[in-house]
Image (tube, rainbow, N blue to C red):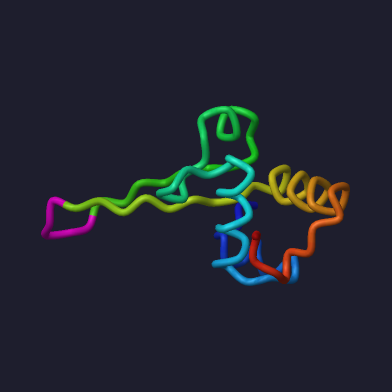
């Protein structure tokens, strides 16, 4: 299944804001917290757009796939990164 960033963060033992910060630091997400195309095409992330009823606004939500979660866990453990801290 797919996980929200909040759910993925909990499974990785960190918080949502810290995980977003790390994924931006390593250029996996852009400054709007949307994954770059290569990570979507690799099947690591899914982006869903929801149009809000009675308005012309849309909401974009990023989800991490099981493959993406496994890769994030592997990547950060290889680099010995402490996900409980914010990137410097």
Specify the quadrant of the image occupied by residue 54.
Answer: bottom left
Q: Is residue 50 magenta?
A: no
Residue toward you, 42 or 81: 81
Specify the quadrant of the image occupied by residue 10.
Answer: bottom right
> Looking at the figure, which quarter contains the C terminus?
bottom right
Main secondary structure of the magenta stretch: loop
In the rendered view, tell whether residue 84 sits above or below residue 42: below
Which residue is drawn at the image coordinates 78% and 64% (left, top)?
82
Residue toward you, 87 or 35: 87
Which residue is drawn at the image coordinates 76% and 44% (left, top)?
71
Specify the quadrant of the image occupied by residue 22.
Answer: bottom right
Residue 43 image offset from top left, x and y in percent? 63, 35
In the rendered view, tell whether residue 38 sits above or below residue 48: above
Which residue is drawn at the image coordinates 37% and 50% (left, top)?
60
Which residue is drawn at the image coordinates 64% and 44% (left, top)?
26
Residue 69 image offset from top left, x and y in percent? 72, 51
In the rendered view, tell whether residue 32 sits above or below residue 16: above
11 on left or right of 7: right
Residue 59 image offset from top left, x and y in percent? 31, 54
Residue toward you, 59 or 74: 74
Range covered by the magenta-colored residues: 52-56
Residue 38 image offset from top left, x and y in percent? 58, 28
21 on left or right of 71: left
């Amino acid at each position: 299944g797919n996980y929200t960033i909040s759910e993925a963060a909990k499974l990785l033992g960190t918080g949502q804001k810290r995980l977003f910060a790390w994924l931006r630091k390593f250029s996996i997400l852009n400054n709007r917290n949307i994954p770059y195309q290569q990570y979507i095409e690799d099947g690591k992330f899914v982006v869903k757009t929801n149009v809000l009823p009675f308005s012309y606004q849309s909401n974009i939500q990023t989800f991490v796939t099981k493959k993406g979660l496994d890769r994030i866990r592997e990547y950060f453990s290889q680099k010995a990164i402490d996900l409980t801290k914010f990137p410097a």
